[in-house]
Image (cartoon, rainbow, N blue to C red):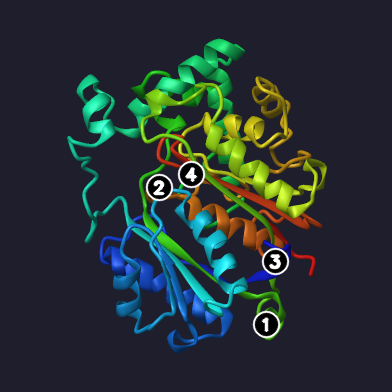
Amino acid sequence: MKPKSIAVIGAAETTRLGKIPDVSVIGLHADAALNAMKDAGLKPSDIDGVATAGISPVELAYYLGITPSYADGTSVGGCSFMLHVRHAAAAINEGLCRTVLITHGESGRSRIGAGGFGRSPSSLMGQFEMPFGVTSPPTMFTIPVLRYMKTYGVTEADLANVAVIQREWAAQNPRASFKDPITVDDVLNSPMIAWPFRMLMCCLVTDGGGALILTSAERAKDFPQKPVYILGTGESVETPMVSQMEDFTSSKAFRVSGKKAFDESGITHADVDHLMIYDAFAHLPLYGLEDLGFVKPGEAKDFMNERNTAIGGKLPLNTNGGGLSYMHSGMYGMYALQESVRQMRGTAAAQIEGAKISVSHGVGGMFAASGTVIFTNQG
């Protein structure tokens, strides 16, 4: 993709976030979509491309009254929306469509119109992991993180510190689910979920969603909001079984996706002003910092302990509060993208002064997939 050839012209989350017991999954998609259209000054008839995960793009298009010339139903977990941005950029550049709507909506907490989480017994995971008790995210992510901790001397306190810093950012965000300060001791004294994860090291379970609208850069300046340009994108997948990762201390999908995005954008790590790394569990920002190349393997814990990613640090990370304190309805990638866009627009609750480049990096499944999008506000 040619850098800056595509821009985000609409971005919004659902009207409410957190606990929404009176809105179904499709209703959350529609609410976010209509909010994003309002943000961009558009109506459904102006949209000719749709992309979504969790529901079918067919269902989304019909519900909103859109007849698209481009549809993307890529679903690889929580980073699906990063891949949607990448695919939409390619589609617009190729002339397949002009204006793409990407939506997310999940009733993760209230389960209104939500599907099940069951995996087929005939799937690879169903055959080779589930019989041994590896059945849910906390029991899956423990496999790599224990090896990572042993290899690099990462302690429970190091993991707890990630949650503490995320909460500090969340305290500045009126829309965050949890804003009260916490300490490392608070995290370590919270209930055990699956070793080494304590409750406060695990993501929230909430209701909500978000939507983005993309178009070509040449059209972007005709819309109400300040355009946010896409500099680079990347994606990759590794394995549906966490037990079969090539290296438990590093995600191959993270490395491939991140490198592709940075190579495409032409920037260096020193150019990055703001970073979003999907934090479904407290170890993910550590892996992200290392696999994206911001620090060397094993150095992420010290980098965070020295408060480089905290308020006032040199690399502000997860400034909305992250999946640990802001929102996590199941597929968090959309919320990371939304915060990157807000930072580039200059409208974030915890705005980073003078920020010009933001990296949004996501995980899908348990290190199964990854997507990376690099944004800038410099046209």
N-term mark: 2 or 1: 2
Q: Amino acid at mark 3?
A: Tyr
Specify few, some or many for label 2: CA neighbours under 10 Å numbering under 14, 14-19, or 20 or more: many
* Residue placed under numbered mark 3 in the picture: 229
Query: SS at mark 3?
Result: strand
Compared to residue 249, the image places residue 15 above or below, namely: below
N-term mark: 1 or 4: 1
Q: Is residue 248 left or right of residue 125?
A: right
N-term mark: 1 or 3: 1
Residues at marks 2 and 1 touching, judged by CB atoms closer than 8 Å? no
Residue at coordinates 65% horizontally, 83% vertically from top-left? 223
Q: Amino acid at mark 1?
A: Arg
Q: Quadrant of the C terminus?
A: bottom right
Specify few, some or many for label 1: CA neighbours under 10 Å numbering under 14, 14-19, or 20 or more: some
**Coordinates of residue 33 in the picture (x, y in percent):** 44, 73
* Residue placed under numbered mark 2 in the picture: 77
Which numbered disc, 1 or 4, marks the residue closer to the eye? 1
Residue at coordinates 21% horizontally, 42% vertically from top-left? 118
Compared to residue 153, the image places residue 139 above or below, namely: below
Residues at marks 4 and 3 touching, judged by CB atoms closer than 8 Å? no
**Coordinates of residue 158 in the picture (x, y in percent):** 58, 21
**Coordinates of residue 224 in the picture (x, y in percent):** 65, 83
* Residue placed under numbered mark 1 in the picture: 219
Is residue 199 or residue 130 the one in the foreground?
Answer: 130
The single residue placed furthest to the front in the displayed view is 94
Specify few, some or many for label 4: CA neighbours under 10 Å numbering under 14, 14-19, or 20 or more: many
